[in-house]
Amino acid sequence: MKNKFSWRAFISFGLSYSFIVIIVSGIILYVAPPGRYAHWVNWEIAGLTKEGWQALHTVFSFSFVILSVFHLFTINWKAFLSYIKSKATSGLNKKREFIFSSALFVIFLFGILFSLPPFQSVMDASEYFTDSWEKAEEEPPIPHAELLTLAELDGQLTNITLEEITNNLSRHQISFSNTNQQTLSEIAKINGTTPLEIYRQITRKPESQRQGSGIGRKTIEDFALELNKDADDVLKLLKENRIKAEKGQTLRDIGDNNNIPPRDIYDLISKE
């Protein structure tokens, strides 16, 4: 004869599983980075994004509540009701415990609401852990920049045009279709990368334009020879633009002394 299905055991197992998931997901969300960074770098733990862990925590929290209600009002309803009736008839005989429990509840409530120590320290610790994930070189240009389209990103960046943005993406073989509809997040997903990497490809200059790629190591004489100009004329041009320089100096040295990027000096020399 088969054993009768035990709802008590079923609910007990369900509560145990839900409790474990709530604890684990709660700890992970406690230390997880803020959404603006998590979305920007596609942050994951154990293959789940922050939204995935939030979904787990939320659904299993509901599951825990629902199973608790069933556990109380179906499986143990009679015992619970009997306990309430006995306390109602005999009166409260644990007054000291009741007072201490109530006082502790009030202390916790007001401590959290008014951000008093040590309760605020718990939240400060969470903020410390969440902020520790962020790196200055990985910060988005604006919060939730992954939601911007290429056209909207163009409006946020002052040193690059939409045409240059699309050219940079094409040069790095990044697939995209519509500059007014596709967001950085969608483009990143299509190309199997992160919005951060898409942004880096957009703002990355060609090799020939990068500081330190060769331009900064060349001297005034080198550029004068390449551009068929006289070195003295180049120095005169720089002086007219209030840039101090000498023949033997490299563009990097000149840039450092005048607080100007070597590329800007090169552009000035080559345009004249």
Image (spheres, rainbow, N blue to C red):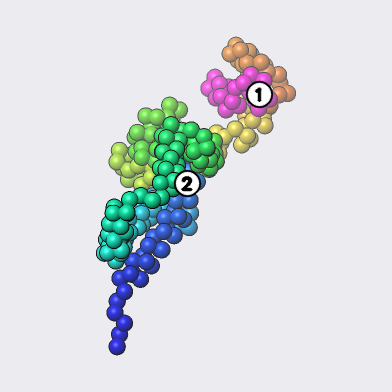
Q: Of the numbered discs in the image, which one, if any, rests on residue 256? A: 1
Query: Quarter of the image holding residue 80?
Result: bottom left
As drawn, 130 above or below 190: above
Q: Of the numbered discs in the image, which one, if any, rests on residue 30? A: 2
**Residue 199 coordinates in the image, percent (x, y):** 45, 40
Residue 203 appears in the picture as rendered: no
Q: Of the numbered discs in the image, which one, if any, rests on residue 78? A: none
Amino acid carrying mark 1 in the image: Asp
Q: Quadrant of the N terminus?
A: bottom left
**Residue 130 coordinates in the image, percent (x, y):** 50, 42
- Within 10 Å of disc 2 (Cα), the crowding (few <14, some 14-19, many 20+) is some
Residue 178 appears in the picture as rendered: yes
As drawn, 227 above or below 191: above
Amino acid carrying mark 2 in the image: Tyr
Q: In the rendered structure, does residue 137 fall within the stretch colored magenta?
A: no
- Residue for point 46% across, 33% down: 115
- Residue for point 44% across, 48% down: 97
Q: Is residue 252 left or right of residue 8?
A: right
Identify which residue, 265 or 145, lies in the foreground: 145
Q: Is residue 200 left or right of residue 249?
A: left
Q: Quadrant of the C terminus?
A: top right
Start and end of the magenta stretch?
A: 251-272
Seen from this angle, which residue lies furthest front? 90
Q: In the rendered structure, does residue 264 fall within the stretch colored magenta?
A: yes
**Residue 108 coordinates in the image, percent (x, y):** 44, 40
**Residue 208 coordinates in the image, percent (x, y):** 56, 36
Query: Quarter of the image holding residue 214?
Result: top right
